[in-house]
Amino acid sequence: MEADSDIKTTPRGFHCGLCNVNLPNQSSVDQHVKGRKHRTLHAVRSTRKTQERHSVFVSGITPLVSQSDVAQYFTQFGPVSDVVMDKDKGVYAIVQFAETDSLQATLSRVEHQLGGLKLRVKPREQKDFKLIPKKNASQNLQQALERLKPQLCQLVSVNAQMQYVVERFQLGDNEKKARGLLVQLLQEVFVEFFPDSQIQPFGSSVNTLGVHSCDLDLFLDLDNTKVFQARAKSTAEQAGEGTSDDGRSEDSILSDIDLSTASPAEVLDLVAAILRRCVPSAHKVTVVSGARLPVVKFHHQQLNLQGDITINNRLAVRNTRFLQLCSGMEERLRPLAYTIRYWAKQKQLAGNPSGAGPLLNNYALTLLIVFFLQSCEPPVLPTVDRLKDLACEEEECVIDGWDCTFPSQPIAVPPSANTQDLSSLLFGFFTFYATFDFAGSVVSLRQGRALPITDFLGQGEKPTKPHGPKLGPVNVLDPFDLSHNVAGNLSERSQRSFQKECQEAHKYCRSLQYQRKSAKGKSWGLVRLFTPRGEAPPPSRPEQLTISIPFKPASLPEALRGRLHEAGGGGFRLPWFREVCAAVEAVLGGVLGCRLARPAGAAFGAESLADAEAGTASPDASLNDSCDSVGSLNEGGAVAGAKRPLDDDDGGAAESPRGKRPRLARRAKPEPAHWVCVQRHAVWAGRRRVRRELVKDTDSRPEGSCTELETEVTARIAEKEPELRGPLEVKVQPQVIGGTESTKAVLRLEPVSDAAGVFHDFFHFLEAFLPKMVETLLENKASASAV
């Protein structure tokens, strides 16, 4: 296998030349070769080699020769898959054939001529495939900050620093003019192929929040073209073939496609063809049909500008108008948005390099800023519902069934009564999201408040759309399309990083280094806030051995979603935690064959959960504290935390000497409820091999997806393998965390007896296996109850 030749033995283990990584042992090699990165690079290399073997290099052409001319000439030798040309110098092309025979037929001809030009044709050079390592992101961010640092340190206040950030990064007049000319050029080109069509820019280029080199997002409006095409067809049917009544020829690109029935992918293919053939300096034209909203991406080489063209994103144009209105009626929005965007970029919280990824996009981050300004007291910005009330009848707007009404001019909105300066608002942003309950909330700019996530877990009918938003670690509803979570791409890790950085920024903004300029010329204000996140995490206390089972509303079974929806508000955590505890017990005891024991009187039942919910402390404290000891009882059998009588034999108040007030008896701190898990076999060792023996087609049954199979695997290991030198005893303490962090069940593992020294192996196995099995058991239970 070719992949085997990529792995070389080194004095310290192995090295993969394809991925440029070092591997310590054979087990790591096996996992790496099966991993996504290695398989993807292997597939890319195979594709590149196939393309090279089917391609010829053509020189001797001139800029007057088009890509279609080259393709048409070489078609005589066989089907042509692709033609890549050097459009600037126009001196060479690479022609890729679909078949090897076509390549041989081309090379066998002694002389090639095209339009009077003598072409030189030779085999394409075979190059070794190499992975280009990514640049050190942290180093690049630090260099960018160093260029910004001198000017920021010289300013007298944080407010002035924030204004400077706007001046430093906003689009200049020349850039705006260049983008406008490109839009005008595209308009002139596309109207020739799509009569009465319109090119409308949206996004950062025109919403007043654009930065240097930001993408140019364009919406190709074909509604008028569809009307024109329908009218032309009607005229042609009445008068026969020829020209329509307005004199325009029907012999155009519209003759080959019916816009009323064509799919978006078909239309975008035409758009891409027009860009390649008719727009100067348009390079790297690709159709991304798998995106939520398919687009055509291109790069304008002369302007060094990335562009996107979509044909079905009218709501985005309206969203752009909304942000324009917000910045027009509140001048503090732009400095705040530019500062927070740059901070998020420096901390590697936002900006997905490939366009798709787990980080915040600028639009989602901007909506978080707007929501914070709506939540200030008094509000800096009004809610979307309030803006709707301020709009006049002529400004009513409905797009795709969504109400997108708001005033067209900022003067129609009363000014805010909030007088906070920029530095205070920036501090307030970090404080607001440092403790924000992302797990239990859905951000709504329409209402200007955080909606309980349980409102989106039920099966209630949606009056305007048949489905709700995609729920995830961060849920931010689009202001108008209420079925779209604009932060739905974020991962749990990204959410934790964002909230952690907000907490760190909150602490820093309370210090004098943020508030006052340094008299000694040291970094202060935004400079220290913009310092990139280092490669290594800051020193902290030793990591605890914990296993997290996150609350994932999108993957919950329907029956369980309904029960949590009935709980409402923050009360969904305890019912969900109870289900998770039951599933964990089933996995440890039933699937893995562990013997489970609990302290006397401790239970994880509904009674103790009800007692925990009845606490009088603050909601967050009550939740976290009670779940530390869910169901835990003290020595006397009373619920932990409940009041106890004074310590005397008669049960009454004991009389203390010298008339002093009687003292309460000292209570021993109750031990939190937990399991003691006893395992006598290494059920984790060789588990995959045993699974392969039981099931031949392992791809159809991923690990942790079938309870019966995993139980059988455990039984087979226990039957064939000898027992451990001594039983492994592990204390497993469950806890639910919510409120300021993403809701999750945390299992803290601590070895009680480990004569064989296998505790860490058992822990690392459970770390991946247990969450998958818990999710499977919850699904099975919900399915059984539904039946």
Image (cartoon, rainbow, N blue to C red):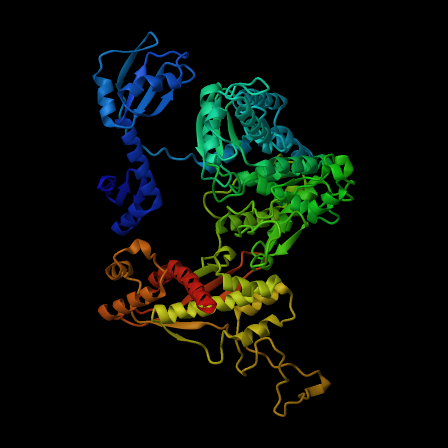
Query: Looking at the rendering, which quadrant does residue 72 occupy?
Result: top left
- Image vertical order of residue 474 relative to residue 241, above or below: below
Q: Is residue 492 visible?
A: yes
Q: Is residue 72 left or right of residue 493?
A: left
Query: Looking at the rendering, which quadrant does residue 658 occupy?
Result: bottom right
Name the residue nearer the viewer: 481 or 161: 481
Where residue 93 sits: x, y (%)? 35, 19
State the residue at coordinates (35%, 12%): 61
Q: Is residue 101 left or right of residue 581?
A: left
- Image vertical order of residue 4 relative to residue 85, above or below: below
Instruction: Classify the position of the C terminus by image quarter.
Output: bottom left
Name the residue nearer the viewer: 329 or 112: 112
Instruction: Classify the position of the N terminus by image quarter.
Output: top left
Where residue 648 sits: x, y (%)? 62, 89
State the residue at coordinates (52%, 81%): 635
Where residue 299 sits: x, y (%)? 48, 26
